[in-house]
């Protein structure tokens, strides 16, 4: 069953000149077709301006398609009466934690959304405690959010979203402002939510290593999805990725260099273990025979 | 005051620099703890450490935005908090570029934004213009952009305008807090390589805070590692990576290539120390299997 269905989606941002006339601008999204099954972990790559965030904002109705349609659990995002159900189904977290925190203590902040759902106070308490424990910020629940580190703040933002108990999380470069430790905390949290709670994750990122463990990688360029496959399928195409301004993980780059030097290298190496294994295999393979 | 003779080439020197936030309250916390180090003219220093390790607090001392609770900051041979020193001059000497510097753009045109600093220095119009053009050129900003609004530019371009706005003051030290954060791989490369080129052509001293070990090893000569407000180590790149496990111990992320070299060594394939770039590792490996 697909949680997200995107059909022929095109979108253009509208600009107006000083007289208020509409200026046509190049479409930010062009004929996107995409089905995401429930429980999938999808990484979306692409350079700035490739349309990643514009696509993300269609998935819970922040933006409305110029052409085509988007359905979340069969609910059409163009249907205004369904918008609250849609936003409860698909939660979004953005890059800058400071822009997403509204309350003066962590638990109040996490409670903001469930309060707005009109839940019983008892139920709110249960949900926010659960959410805070899931992302590991329970011990900071009475702290002021602005005193927390970036990674902690971002976990507060995630807790605030999962307290709504969404089925799908859209995460738009949520680790971009964090240090490696913060990034690891967040990635562990997100992977856990996907694995243990079965939440569908759509992760927009510039960090290739965050895409390596996903089920599926989408590469966007100029408003289109130009590649769609498993991490191994995508990262083995080093040249194509470089042509659209993306990096490959260092291990893949290493294998690429070795293969250019004439070694017979496996081209689907994407993580450290595989890399170490492959290098050891090559050492055996090219052992001097005498 | 500072001990010993101040070497003329020493651009930055701190002596037992300590900073405590919320001093005298129950919330008192020591962000920087007894830091002594010095930087020579023209060096490119990488600063690494966790969030909360004191990096940002440290750099805000180097141009006098924060006053030490204890200890000294000496810039170009002068104690910046002595009565004889005008702190405003120090801020022209030490250019500080914060994270997400594009948020600080505010003028109507790119030109005006870059000119803001030099204007405040009270320079002549002619001089201001020259400096804007030089700074724009150094950051790869096309002259045709100068009359445009900075808000029409892309994220990476805005970032470079903000950088030009600092280097137009021709500081002797440039301090950058995560200048490539949040940019895509292409934008990262452009911003960092412009900084590196400017460092080489102008001989300016650069301090670069980055969480990306890969960026640090690519551009910096030396690495200053902060941990819990203290100076963990301050060594050349080669030295730091000759004992990589020390960095791993304090939870810093090593370049992936270094990790691979360490794992290979454990498995009996020792390619040597200090392997922190992909091309170096590839070369060593090819040499080892006799393919070079």
Image (spheres, rainbow, N blue to C red):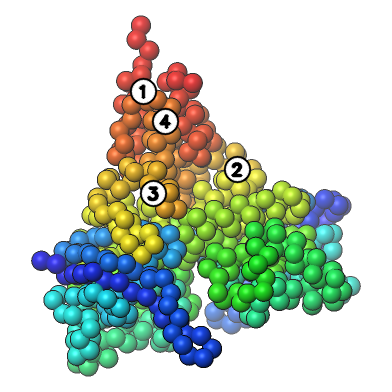
Q: Residue at x 23, y 83 (%)?
A: A78
Which image quadrant: the C terminus of chain A?
Answer: top left
Q: Which mark is residue B237?
A: 2
Q: Are marks 2 and 3 on the same chain?
A: no
What percent of the width, then of the height, locates residue B43?
Answer: 71, 49
Q: Whole-Å distance between the Cαs marked 4 and 3?
A: 17 Å
For residue A4, what is the image quadrant?
bottom left
Classify mark 4: helix, strand or loop: helix
List the residue tagged with mark 3.
A241
Q: Relative to the observer, which residue lies in front, B43 or B20?
A: B43
Q: Which mark is residue A139?
A: none
Q: Which mark is residue A260?
A: 4
Q: Whole-Å distance between the Cαs marked 3 and 1?
A: 28 Å
List the residue tagged with mark 1.
A283
Residue neighbourhood size for the residue with mark 3, other residues' Cα within 10 Å, grouped as few (<14), some (14–19), many (≥20): some
Q: Can you name the residue that lies furthest to the top here?
A: A290
Q: Whole-Å distance between the Cαs marked 4 and 2?
A: 28 Å
């Amino acid at each position: 069953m697909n949680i997200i269905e995107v059909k022929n989606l095109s979108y253009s941002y509208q600009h107006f000149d000083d007289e208020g006339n509409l200026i046509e601008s190049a479409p930010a999204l062009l004929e996107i077709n995409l089905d995401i099954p429930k429980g999938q972990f999808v990484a979306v790559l692409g350079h700035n301006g490739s349309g990643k965030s514009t696509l993300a904002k269609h998935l819970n109705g922040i933006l409305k398609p110029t052409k085509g349609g988007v359905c979340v659990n069969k609910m059409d995002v163009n249907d205004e009466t369904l918008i609250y159900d849609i936003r409860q189904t698909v939660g979004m977290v953005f890059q800058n934690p400071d822009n997403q925190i509204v309350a003066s203590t962590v638990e109040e902040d996490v409670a903001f959304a469930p309060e707005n759902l009109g839940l019983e106070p008892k139920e709110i308490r249960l949900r926010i405690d659960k959410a805070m424990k899931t992302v590991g910020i329970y011990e900071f629940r009475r702290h002021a959010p602005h005193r927390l580190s970036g990674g902690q703040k971002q976990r507060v933002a995630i807790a605030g979203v999962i307290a709504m108990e969404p089925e799908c999380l859209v995460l738009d470069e949520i680790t971009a402002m964090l240090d490696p430790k913060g990034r690891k905390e967040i990635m562990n949290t997100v992977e856990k939510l996907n694995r243990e709670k079965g939440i569908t994750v759509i992760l927009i990122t510039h960090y290739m290593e965050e895409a390596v463990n996903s089920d599926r990688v989408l590469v966007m360029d100029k408003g289109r999805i130009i590649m769609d496959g498993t991490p191994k399928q995508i990262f083995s195409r080093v040249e194509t990725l470089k042509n659209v301004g993306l990096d490959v993980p260092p291990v893949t780059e290493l294998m690429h260099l070795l293969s250019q030097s004439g070694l017979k290298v496996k081209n689907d190496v994407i993580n450290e273990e595989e890399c170490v294994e492959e290098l050891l295999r090559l050492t055996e393979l090219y052992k001097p025979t005498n | 005051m500072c001990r010993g003779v101040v070497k003329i080439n020493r651009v930055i020197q701190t002596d037992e620099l300590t900073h405590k936030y919320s001093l005298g309250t129950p919330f008192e916390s020591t962000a920087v703890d007894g830091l002594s180090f010095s930087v020579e003219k023209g060096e490119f220093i990488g600063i690494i450490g966790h969030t909360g390790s004191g990096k940002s607090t440290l750099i805000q001392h180097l141009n006098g935005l924060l006053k030490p609770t204890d200890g000294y900051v000496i810039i170009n041979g002068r104690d910046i908090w002595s009565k004889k020193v005008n702190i405003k001059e120090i801020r022209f000497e030490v250019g500080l570029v914060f994270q997400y510097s594009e948020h600080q753009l505010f003028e109507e045109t790119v030109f005006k934004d870059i000119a803001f600093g030099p204007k405040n220095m009270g320079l002549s119009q002619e001089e201001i213009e020259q400096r804007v053009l030089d700074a724009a050129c150094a950051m790869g900003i096309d002259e045709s952009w100068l009359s445009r609004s900075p808000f029409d530019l892309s994220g990476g371009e805005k970032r470079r305008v903000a950088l030009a706005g600092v280097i137009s003051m021709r500081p002797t030290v440039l301090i950058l807090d995560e200048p490539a954060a949040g940019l895509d791989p292409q934008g990262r490369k452009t911003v960092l390589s412009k900084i590196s080129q400017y460092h080489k052509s102008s001989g300016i001293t650069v301090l670069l805070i980055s969480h990306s070990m890969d960026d640090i090893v690519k551009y910096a000569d030396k690495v200053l590692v902060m941990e819990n407000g203290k100076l963990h180590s301050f060594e050349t790149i080669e030295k730091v990576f000759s004992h990589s496990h020390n960095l791993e111990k304090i939870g810093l992320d090593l370049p992936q290539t270094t990790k691979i070299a360490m794992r290979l060594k454990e498995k009996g394939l020792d390619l040597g120390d200090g392997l922190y770039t992909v091309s170096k590792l590839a070369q060593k490996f090819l040499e080892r299997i006799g393919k070079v």
